[in-house]
Amino acid sequence: MEGRATVLSFREKFGYGLGDTASNFFFQVFNIFLLYYYTDIFGLTPAAVGTMFIVTKVVDAVSDPVMGLIADRTNSRWGKFRPYLLWAAVPYGIMGYAMFANPDFTYAGKLVYAYATYTLMMLAYTTINIPYSALMGVISPSSAERTKVASFRFICAFGAAWLIGTFVTPLKNILGGGDEANGFRLTMMIFAVISIGLFWVTFATTKERVKTPQKDSNLKSDFGALMSNGPWLALFLAAIFTLMNLAVRNGAIIYYFKYYVGDDGSPIFLIFDKTAVFMSSGLFAMIAGVAFTKFLSNRFGKRNLLIALSSMNAVLIAAFFFIPPQQYGLMIFVNCIGAFISGPTPALVWAMYADCADYGEWKTGRRTTALIFSALQFAQKMGLAVGAGVSGFILALFGFVANTAQSDSSMLGIRLMFSLFPALLAILGIVAVVFYRLSEEQVSEIEIELEKRREENS
């Protein structure tokens, strides 16, 4: 293991961050456009899509922790986690494209195809993203360095999210020539190629530095160590509610602007329509917010800062219920303020995940980095799936019918999905973080103790 004072180079931190750029070329498309694609383009009912999102999580309930256990036990000349960035990139890209291939099947055939491709994509996502996330826990033994890495990661992630929010709608319109299905298919083909290349860059530019030999391969001991990790349990619950909030709100964006604001796809700035400008400006503000992560976390601590920023953002999300459709400028303003405030939160959360891995090793003597990240990633995917599923059920409950003028009831459902429902879920996530009891002082003490142990063992 390299010394505690090791400072990671810009090249390595940026290279690691590009892995989340690769992830977000698909993740953000799924998060923002997938429900819309399935209902308004592929022709599935909202309730059927909602059910699919939830039912397919049964596979993740098994595959995520299994992948974590496999990654923790992998030993290769490239390390434990980096090999998967090399091996799994191509299947990941292929399955992301396949989801939007739009075969001309019957309704039943389309539903089966959606189940199959969505499930296989989530398996590919698990295979590459759990090792990628766990890599941050071993890229440096220093919590401060990992926080910097997390900041780079989410600047790159939000950069990809900005590209998605800004260019997907005009790009699929240009490439499809008015055929939305073909536009999505060609757009995802481009994203697949880029994602594969970026994961390979991450593989080539990073290094694993924390190497702790496992005492044995006892699965019961690994899960016992995980369940005794109090800070991890708090973040596990917070992840579910936070990603439910994200899924419900992002899933509602297209519906909110298409049916409530009245965005017909006409450009208002160059080639960009109202929806694209709204998402683009918010993501610019979020990237700006990420830049303050290190300064603010040093001043207030990760836990307290996360609670404060998340609380302010929840209030601003709720405010959208009261903004009339004609006040587009006000929507942009409120969204940018909320996005700037929430910018540091993902980097804080992922740095806290890595701190949980240190805490678990310090407490039990077992370092289960990938298992910790895999279980948390399962919580995130569960939150996203349940949130997206709930969105489908809400649309069905309030009487939504695709590509028609909406009733007062369905319009109310769309507005609730974009404001009060996600705000409530954000508050529940904040309550869970309150129970995270790992202070910055404890993290520093744990780092020192673990370094002593590793030096003695080596």
Image (cartoon, helix red, strand yellow):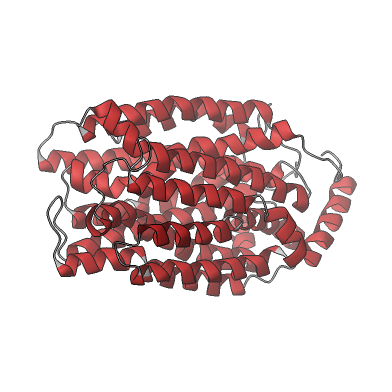
Up the image or down, 153 lies above or below 95; here it is below
Residue 61 left/right relative to 364: left
Quarter of the image for the C terminus: give it: top right
Quarter of the image for the N terminus: give it: top right
- Between residue 368 and residue 115, name the one nearer to us: 115
Residue at the far left in the pictured view: 106
Residue 180 left/right relative to 443: left
At 76% from the left edge and 64% from the top edge, which residue is drawn?
299
Q: Position of residue 175 (x, y in %)?
A: 29, 26
Residue 207 visible from this viewpoint: no
At 28% from the left edge and 34% from the top edge, which residue is drawn?
100
Dividing the picture into quarters, in which one does residue 96 lie?
top left
Residue 403 left/right relative to 313: left
Q: Position of residue 174 (x, y in %)?
A: 29, 28
- Between residue 341 and residue 391, name the one nearer to us: 341
| Count of numbered tags | 0
Q: Position of residue 244 (x, y in %)?
A: 41, 61
At 84% from the left edge and 62% from the top edge, which residue is drawn?
445
- Between residue 215 and residue 286, name the one nearer to us: 286
Residue 230 visible from this viewpoint: yes
At 36% from the left edge and 53% from the top edge, which residue is drawn?
57
Q: Position of residue 219 (x, y in %)?
A: 58, 53
Residue 124 left/right relative to 368: left
Up the image or down, 57 lies above or below 119; here it is below
